[in-house]
């Protein structure tokens, strides 16, 4: 047999047209993408060095500055999901051996703690049960004790359904020469955040939640304090791809001529209204509820997986269980951006009521 002949035939699946069922994505993301944003994805591809590309990237930057409410020049969108921005923030601002303080009240703080540990930071966790929140006093005490270079807080803790207050924390961090990093992957566009006014040094989000874009791009912004720290390091960041020295150049943020632009992203930010879901009992304080993701205590006697499977099968609707420490505690309904309509909230509640009627309830 000749070395040039194909011996592995094309798989039958590659010869079939791709099918994607239409579903109501009422989980914690991805959310349904509205037609006007889907249509943007069908535009022709242009070259990464074409002048139109620079214009599009500048527009994206301005869109993110608006959505984040910041004038930071160092504002870009990463190629990758929310995790890419998480890693970019930590890898660039922290050097091995430096102290990092992480607020853990659900899965996302724990994830950042692990990312920081993997790159050799000296990580200190402040831990609460899922849905718990940290007072500014507790935060200040921990900052004084551990003297971190970075303090991480999740604004919208999607595993617990909590929207954490942010006011005053940036000032505490400034006073103690520490950077304030905030994750708004599940909250940006659903709950107000003001990067500049709230003295947040680094802020990131994801595209596939309240912003209603496809997954795969993660906006992130660094202020002057953060830039000063990350561009005066002794060591290079552990990741080449996420090195802000390169990324800031690709995005024209460093004032130097662009070398090569490799990041193609479509990003359409917009603010959305609050979720209108009727709140069913859960463990999060009423006034700290995350508007984009509502956690619902699993009704007594029901198997949550069965409820979710019933809702998917009979209502073509995604809802999800808990995540990390909230598994088995809660179910989660997300109504984000374009999905955030009263009719959708009613539809979700009807589906839930139908599942409660038709799924078995244990005697216990
Ligand atoms: N942070 C929060 C608060 C999230 O809700 C998520 C995703 N559920 C992430 C980070 C990670 O984002 P991604 O799944 O896009 O990597």
Image: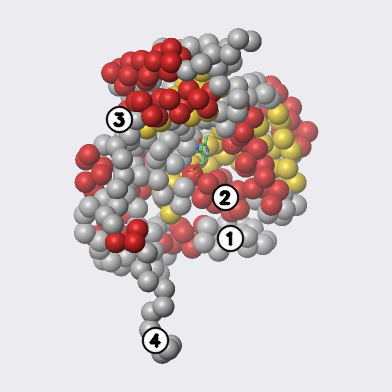
Distance from mark 2 CB to nearest ligand 1 atom below 8 Å: no
Relative height, residue 41 to residue 293 (above, below) = below
Marks 2 and 1 in Cβ contact (< 8 Å): yes
Marks 4 and 2 in Cβ contact (< 8 Å): no
Q: Residue at x 51, y 50 (%)?
A: 84
Marks 2 and 3 in Cβ contact (< 8 Å): no
What's the CA distance linking mark 1 and mark 3? Answer: 35 Å
Which label's residue is closer to the chain start, 2 or 1?
Answer: 2
Relative image position of residue 346 (x, y in whole percent): 33, 15
Relative height, residue 290 to residue 225 (above, below) = above
Secondary-structure class at tag 4: loop
Distance from mark 1 CB to nearest ligand 1 atom below 8 Å: no
Task: Kindly indicate the quadrant of the structure image that contains residue 101.
Answer: top right
What's the CA distance linking mark 2 and mark 3? Answer: 28 Å
What's the CA distance linking mark 4 and mark 3? Answer: 51 Å
Q: Is residue 237 left or right of residue 24?
A: right
Read off the residue under disc 1: 239
Question: Which one is in front, 167 or 344?
Answer: 344
Q: Which mark is residue 4?
A: 4
Q: Which of labels 1 and 3 is toward the front?
A: 3
């Amino acid at each position: 047999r000749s070395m040039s002949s194909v011996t592995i035939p094309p798989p039958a699946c590659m010869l079939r047209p791709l099918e994607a069922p239409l579903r109501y994505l009422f989980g914690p993301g991805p959310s349904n993408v509205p037609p006007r944003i889907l249509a943007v994805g069908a535009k022709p591809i242009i070259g990464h060095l074409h002048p139109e590309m620079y214009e599009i990237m500048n527009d994206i930057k301005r869109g993110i500055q608006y959505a984040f409410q910041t004038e930071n020049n160092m504002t870009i969108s990463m190629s990758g999901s929310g995790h890419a921005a998480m890693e970019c923030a930590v890898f660039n601002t922290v050097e091995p051996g430096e102290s990092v303080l992480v607020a853990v009240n659900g899965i996302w703080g724990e994830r950042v703690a692990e990312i920081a540990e993997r790159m050799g930071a000296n990580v200190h966790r402040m831990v609460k049960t899922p849905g718990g929140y940290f007072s500014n006093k507790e935060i200040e005490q921990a900052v004084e004790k551990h003297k971190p270079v970075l303090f991480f807080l999740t604004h919208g803790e999607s595993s617990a359904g909590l929207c954490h207050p942010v006011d005053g924390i940036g000032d505490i961090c400034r006073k103690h020469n520490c950077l304030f990093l905030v994750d708004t992957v599940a909250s940006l566009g659903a709950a107000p955040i003001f990067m500049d006014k709230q003295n947040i040094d680094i802020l990131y989000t994801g595209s596939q939640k309240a912003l209603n874009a496809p997954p795969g791009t993660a906006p992130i912004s660094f202020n002057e304090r953060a830039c000063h720290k990350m561009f005066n390091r002794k060591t290079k960041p552990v990741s080449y791809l996420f090195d802000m020295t390169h990324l800031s150049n690709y995005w024209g943020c460093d004032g130097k001529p662009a070398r090569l632009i490799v990041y193609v992203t479509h990003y359409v930010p917009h603010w959305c209204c609050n979720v209108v879901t009727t709140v069913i009992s859960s463990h999060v304080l009423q006034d700290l509820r995350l508007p984009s993701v509502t956690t619902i205590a699993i009704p007594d006697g029901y198997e949550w997986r069965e409820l979710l499977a019933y809702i998917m099968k009979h209502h073509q609707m995604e809802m999800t269980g808990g995540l990390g420490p909230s598994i088995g505690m809660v179910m989660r309904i997300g109504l984000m951006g374009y999905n955030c309509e009263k009719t959708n909230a009613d539809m979700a509640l009807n589906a839930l009521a139908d599942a409660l009627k038709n799924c078995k309830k244990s005697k216990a």
